[in-house]
Amino acid sequence: MINYFRVPPEKRLHARVMWIIGGVTVFCAILFFALYLCIGAQAKAVPGTDAAARWQAEDSIVSHAQLAAYFDKNNAFQLNDVYLNRMEMEKALEENSITAPEGAQPFIDAFSGETQLSVSTDRASLSVQATVCGGNFFFFHPLDLISGGYFKEGDINACTVILDEYAAWQLFGAVDVTGMEVSISGQLFYVTGVTRAPTDEVERSAYGEMPRVFVNYTGLRLIQNYDSATCYEIVLPNPIENFAADLVKKQYGIQNDSKNAVLYDYTERFDFETLVSASQHYFERIMRYDSVVPPYWENIARVAENKAIVISFFDAVVGILTLICFVIFISLWFCIHPIRIHNIYTFFEDKVEARRMKRWLKKHSNIEAPAQSSSSPVSAEITALQETASAPSLSNERNLADC
């Protein structure tokens, strides 16, 4: 069997080529997995893309989908629409025998809109970009808080707000201002926390130059009659493909070719297969034909998605190259070392004989000559061992005879 792995002199050039291609194969395989990890890093760079994984129970047999719908201002929905659509979606889930455990919700959602507000304190007045949010907004967008905490739907005091660090500095001259109050349209809003603003260049560009605040939707609706949401996000069961997406489209009137509303599936947005498929129409998808102005986090997600598409394209090319090199390597290997039935039989025969010899030596502590002569490799090795063991005694007898 050892001779099988020896390279014949006339095939040494083939062997060198084979090992070079083998090295290229290993390099491409490492590069493939490195690029694949980079795709995962792009997904993790967008906070909140794992909402479905965090919401779905570990023992749940039904998969969940994370969806985000964005509307232009002329097609914004209102708070009453959210309540009615929630009831309709719960009814649709019950009709499909999809129920949550007792005391739990079948799905989780959030809604938000964008506007500009004037915020003031005794110290200063400031124009800010406001994200007016309701539902479980901070489940989908876990802000990096410097101090304080989040407000949530159903709080007794609906007049609550979170400031970013720029707004906090200009309004109070500090960032630890939890519990203090700011005035919006003459109404005092309780500051529940201060969030850190993005520092990355791309994220900062999407975030905007203006200081930003996150205002409770219910509170601003009460004092300013604000009721114009342009973003709806939800995590809900998806027992069959497109069940969740079709349900949201139906409830919010989103058409496949609509130019005033778009729906994104975050669950599969950064999947390798989805990205490779999107790379086929990369330049077309960059062009915008709708009138939707997405929020800043969606623009951050689009940048990360476009990067991931480019990486996935090269990753697919490297994967194909790895497969081709591997096939060539295997072909050259069997060209240099052809497989013959005799070689395989001899290999296993040697293994069996070696095991028999080990068992025999373990059973007989003193090596005895075999009763019958044999030409097998085991008999030859036993005879050699016997001659070696008896050699010292023969030399001793000769010495005694000389004396």
Image (cartoon, rainbow, N blue to C red):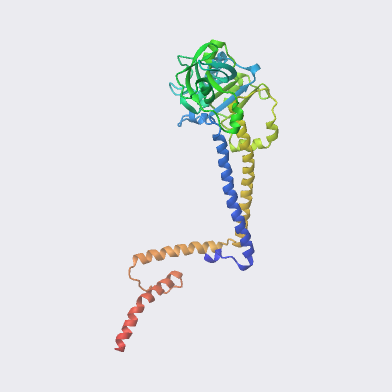
Residue 81: image location, x then y, percent:
57, 15
Query: Which quarter of the rendered picture does the C terminus lie within?
Result: bottom left
Rendered view: 357 above or below 266? below
The residue depicted at 59 percent of the width and 47 percent of the height is 31
Please give the name of the residue rendered at 63% of the width and 54% of the height, measured from the top-left corner.
328
Image quadrant where residue 117 sits = top right
Q: Specify whether residue 281 is in view.
A: no
Using residue 377 as the reference point, say whether residue 229 is left or right of it.
right
Q: Nearer the viewer, residue 36 or 211?
A: 211
Residue at 61% from the left image edge and 68% from the top image edge? 9
Residue 375's x, y, as percent?
Answer: 46, 73
285 or 242, which is in the foreground? 285
What residue is at 60 percent from the left and 32 percent from the top? 202
Q: Residue furthest bottom?
A: 402
Could one spot residue 359 in this view of the protein?
yes
Q: How many marks?
A: 0
Residue 395: x %, y % from top left:
34, 82
Residue 340 position within the rendered picture, expressed as x and y whole percent measured from the top left: 57, 62
User: Who is closer to the viewer here, 2 or 368?
Assistant: 2
Q: Nearer the viewer, residue 117 or 245?
A: 117
- Determine which quarter of the picture holds residue 377: bottom left
Q: Quadrant of residue 238?
A: top right
Along the horizontal axis of the image, is 350 left or right of 338? left
